[in-house]
């Protein structure tokens, strides 16, 4: 079975912004470089961490997504685009315009929090602080890369009769050339992208963030229900672990094979 790598995406700030890459280097048992490197704590989490954080911007370790601002709780975040620019971040929202910040500058971190407030719900704990940690702040603590399929997306778009686009899914790698939703049956198989190899570990369960139009930041469909009705479960895409690192680029050939058990990391 062969296909190709269509798109590569990275999300330097968890749930806030997105950037497309034409190539990236994968490293064994690691996530994409700078993927979910930063996240924004809300006030409730900041109060709980006040003693250990002080005035700093480094948390001690990985924390669950409920500790941070996220698209399921604040749909307006889904309309933020942009990512790394030099030593800083450049983010854009259709209603807020563009902001450029240096994450380690306290004044810039405060400016980012103020910039986010108008698109964050008043009934949720307010945005509080931009932070990073010793490991990526992805939804799962395991060092996974997320993989979505253009073929599966096309199937859902045809079912709904509307374009959804790749942005709302916040996946790292988009592949094409396979049967719709075939990837959900690849658990334990190896995906080879050029010289890189990834073992598929588990399906990705989806939340309300995927129900939001990324052009407007407004919900436009019940995606969890749509996926469940279409496929019997609210899954879209899979998590995979890099078992052989290499440079990968858009349009690289993809092959799928059974996994050599010795290649699977613990």
Image (cartoon, rainbow, N blue to C red):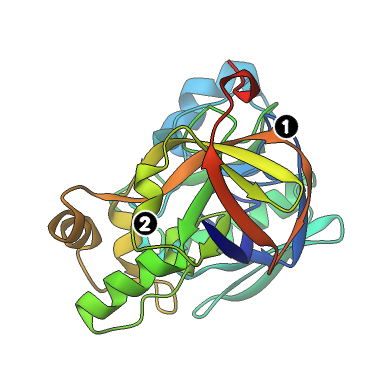
The numbered mark at residue 28 is 1
The residue lying toward the viewer, choosing from 55 and 216, is 216
Question: Up-down: is 53 above or below 249?
Answer: above
Side of 217 relative to 1 (left or right): left
Q: Is mark 1 on a helix, strand or loop?
A: loop
Residue 197, relative to residue 123: is it above or below? above
Residue 204 visible in rendering: yes
Q: Which mark is residue 85?
A: none
Instruction: Identify which residue is drawn at 77% across, 61% down.
Output: 23
| Left or right: 31 as drawn, with respect to 15 | right
Which quarter shows the C terminus? Answer: top right
Mark 2 secondary-structure assignment = loop
- The foreground one among 60 and 145 is 145
Residue at the (52%, 27%) spot, across then down: 141
Give the number of the disc on residue 74.
2
Label 2 to label 1: alpha-carbon separation: 34 Å
Q: Residues within 10 Å of mark 1 (few under 14, many from 20)?
A: some
Q: Which residue is drawn at 69% across and 29% down?
A: 58
Between residues 216 and 18, which one lies in front from this camera angle?
Answer: 18
Instruction: Indicate the position of residue 241 as horizontal and vertical percent values.
Output: 59, 34
Which marked residue is nearer to the observer: mark 2 or mark 1? Answer: 1
Q: Residue 206: give x, y in percent of width and height.
A: 32, 49
Tally of numbered tags: 2
């Amino acid at each position: 079975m062969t296909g190709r790598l269509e798109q590569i995406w990275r999300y330097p700030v968890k749930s806030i912004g997105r950037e497309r890459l034409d190539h990236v280097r994968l490293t064994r048992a690691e996530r994409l470089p700078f993927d979910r490197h930063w996240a924004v704590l809300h006030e409730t989490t900041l109060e709980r961490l006040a003693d250990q954080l002080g005035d700093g911007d480094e948390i001690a370790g990985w924390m669950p997504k409920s500790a941070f601002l996220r698209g399921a709780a604040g749909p307006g975040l889904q309309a933020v685009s942009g990512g790394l620019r030099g030593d800083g971040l450049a983010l854009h929202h259709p209603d807020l315009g563009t902001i450029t910040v240096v994450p380690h500058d306290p004044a810039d971190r405060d400016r980012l929090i103020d910039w986010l407030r108008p698109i964050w719900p008043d009934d949720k704990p307010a945005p509080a602080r931009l932070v990073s940690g010793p490991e990526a702040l992805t939804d799962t603590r395991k060092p996974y890369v997320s993989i979505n399929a253009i073929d599966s997306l096309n199937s859902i778009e045809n079912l709904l009769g509307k374009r959804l686009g790749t942005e709302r899914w916040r996946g790292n790698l988009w592949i094409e050339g396979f049967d719709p939703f075939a990837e959900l049956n690849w658990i334990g198989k190896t995906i080879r992208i050029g010289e890189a190899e990834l073992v598929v570990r588990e399906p990705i369960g989806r939340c309300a963030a995927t129900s939001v139009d990324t052009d407007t930041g407004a919900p436009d469909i019940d995606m969890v229900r749509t996926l469940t009705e279409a496929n019997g479960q609210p899954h879209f895409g899979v998590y995979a672990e890099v078992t052989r690192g290499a440079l990968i680029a858009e349009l690289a050939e993809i092959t799928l094979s059974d996994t050599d058990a010795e290649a699977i990391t613990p």
